Image (cartoon, grey):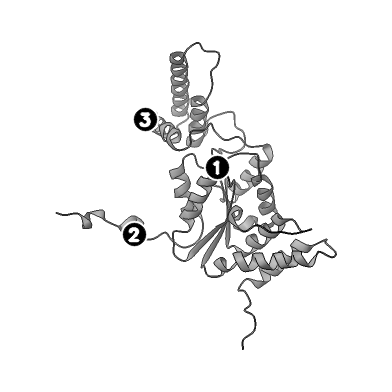
Amino acid sequence: MSGPRVPRNSYAIYRAVNRIFKGISSPPQGDYHEVVRYMNEELPRFEQANSSYLVLGSYRGAYGQRLREFANCLNMPTNAESIVLGDTINLDTAVVPEFDIKINLLGEAADYIAGVYEKESGGESPELGVVRALFVNKTFVFPRDYTGLTRDSLETREDVIQAALAVYYADFDHLDNEHSVAEKKKEEIASLLTVAQEEGIDINERELTDLIKERQNNIDEPPAEYSWVHLSFFKRFEAMTQCHPWTTMPELRDHADEMPGPERPQWETEFDVGMFCDE
């Protein structure tokens, strides 16, 4: 009769468990059982994958839908597995915080971590701080509407897009009627394009209009705002080439390919629907 199977990432799990109970002199036996239960429930999926991903972000409402859509993109290759932290089982502990157990075990067990960010408030803020401190080298961040630390001028194509979105979603409450608001926005965006051309930024009116319409159709929200702390974290990951900003859902889905790991299925690019059509 064989003994218990040792997980392939046992050393990482030991590190996680040591952190979970660090500083707690005598945790209740039930807390130990909950840690083991979580390991048995959630970690086997990572064990069976060649590339595993822990996905962090906002887990509710439209934010959660977009987060899970991104996680599904990571799951496309048959030998890849992604887990959204907010979708894992709930734990009943007396002393050890549930979040400590989840972020430490999943963060250590995953090959890579992906954080999708769209706002500065909520539980994603402490998560970002933890992965920056413990797992920075294997973490990739995907902040919506991020263009770098605050800038006063247009330097890149992304700067122009974000400035145009800010104009499009501005209230302009001081104007009298809807026509005046539309005309004002049109003038502001035309001015942006003039400055962009003067700066040698490659974007034209048709592209900018299409991007605004696409944004309106799938994420009809003003540009995301972040605290100075968030921006500093994003800047750190940007310096490590591990930060990938996005504006629309198609861009976020495409960014799944920026994560290390197996390639997407060949049929996505090689499938020819014409082979099933009658000639």
Lower sequence index among marks 2 and 3: 3
Q: Residues within 10 Å of mark 2 (few under 14, many from 20)?
A: few
Say which residue label 1 marks: 61
- SS type, badge 2: helix
Name the mark nearer the viewer: 1 or 2: 1
The residue located at (50%, 61%) in the rendering is 261
Q: Residues within 10 Å of mark 1 (few under 14, many from 20)?
A: few
In the rendered structure, find residue 95 and report the number of the disc placed on it: none
Name the residue nearer the viewer: 18 or 247. Answer: 18
Residue 225 appears in the rendering: yes
Name the outermost residue toward the top: 176
- SS type, badge 1: helix
Q: Is residue 241 left or right of residue 198?
A: right
The residue located at (65%, 49%) in the rendering is 128
The residue located at (53%, 23%) in the rendering is 170
Say which residue label 2 marks: 267
Q: Residues within 10 Å of mark 3 (few under 14, many from 20)?
A: few
Q: Is residue 228 above or below residue 103?
A: above
Say which residue label 3 marks: 206
Residue 18 appears in the rendering: no
Find the distance from the CA under tag 3 to the CA under tag 1.
32 Å
Check disc 3 and give the amino acid type.
Arg
Name the mark nearer the viewer: 3 or 1: 1
Q: Quadrant of the N terminus?
A: bottom right
Check disc 2 and give the amino acid type.
Trp
Query: x%, y% of residue 249?
Result: 46, 43
Lower sequence index among marks 1 and 2: 1
Q: How many marks?
A: 3
Find the distance from the CA under tag 2 to the CA under tag 3.
32 Å
Q: Is residue 1 above or below residue 90?
A: below
Lower sequence index among marks 3 and 1: 1
